[in-house]
Image (spheres, grey):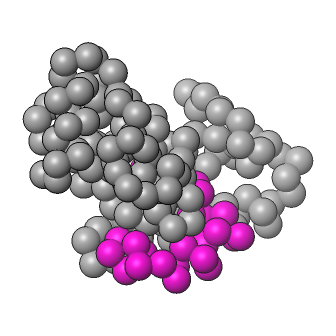
């Protein structure tokens, strides 16, 4: 575990709050926050700190970006973060993001470390493709993350 991650972990244990991520890492604020949240999520899972894990997952859901989404998706898969995984899949599957994400080093890491996630991603993209072919007026179709084609949360009907 790197020193800044350990400091952040101790800060959380003593204060029950996340520290200011930018103060702990010498990177741009956006990257520092994402990178630290990724490392803290892994540490939280390792040491069974569920509240910290949830806080990191929420932080990563807010900070999804082209350059970090593939590694974040791999992390979500490895540490069983279903909400984070759904957010990452949805982000990557959008046509304007998919090509750019596939060109990142993180995508190569994702292919090597979590090949099964690529199958899920393809299924997600195919499902979105089906929805764009179907007249969007139907509105009763839901995507794998539980949203309709307009991004609204939809509760499944039980027949």
In this rendering, does residue 145 appear at all? yes
- What residue span does the magenta drawing correspond to? 83-110
Q: Quadrant of residue 108?
A: bottom left
In this rendering, does residue 88 appear at all? no
| Magenta stretch secondary structure, dominant | helix
Q: How many numbered circles does the render carry? A: 0
Q: Quadrant of residue 126?
A: bottom right
Q: Quadrant of the C terminus?
A: top right
Which residue is rendered at x = 29% and y = 68% of the image? 114
Residue 3: image location, x then y, percent = 16, 48
Which residue is rendered at x = 45% and y = 35% of the image? 58
Q: Is residue 78 left or right of residue 110?
A: left
From this view, report whether residue 155 is shown above or below residue 115: above
Which residue is rendered at x = 56% and y = 59% of the image? 65
Q: Residue furthest top?
A: 15
Residue 91: image location, x then y, percent = 59, 57
Q: Please state which of residues 62 and 152 is positioned toward the viewer in this rendering.
A: 62
Q: Is 26 covered by the magenta stretch?
A: no
């Amino acid at each position: 575990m790197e020193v800044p991650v350990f400091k952040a972990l101790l800060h959380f244990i003593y204060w029950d709050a996340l520290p200011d991520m930018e103060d702990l890492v010498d990177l741009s604020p956006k990257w520092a926050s994402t990178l630290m949240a990724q490392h803290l999520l892994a540490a939280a899972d390792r040491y069974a700190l569920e509240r910290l894990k949830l806080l990191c997952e929420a932080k990563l859901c807010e900070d999804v970006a082209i350059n970090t989404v593939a590694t974040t998706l791999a992390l979500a898969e490895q540490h069983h973060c279903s909400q984070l995984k759904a957010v990452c899949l949805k982000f990557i599957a959008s046509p304007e993001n998919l090509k750019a994400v596939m060109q990142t080093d993180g995508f190569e890491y994702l292919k090597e470390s979590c090949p099964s996630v690529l199958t899920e991603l393809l299924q997600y993209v195919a499902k979105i493709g089906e929805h764009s072919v179907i007249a969007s007026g139907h509105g009763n179709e839901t995507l794998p993350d539980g949203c309709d084609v307009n991004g609204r949360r939809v509760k499944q009907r039980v027949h």
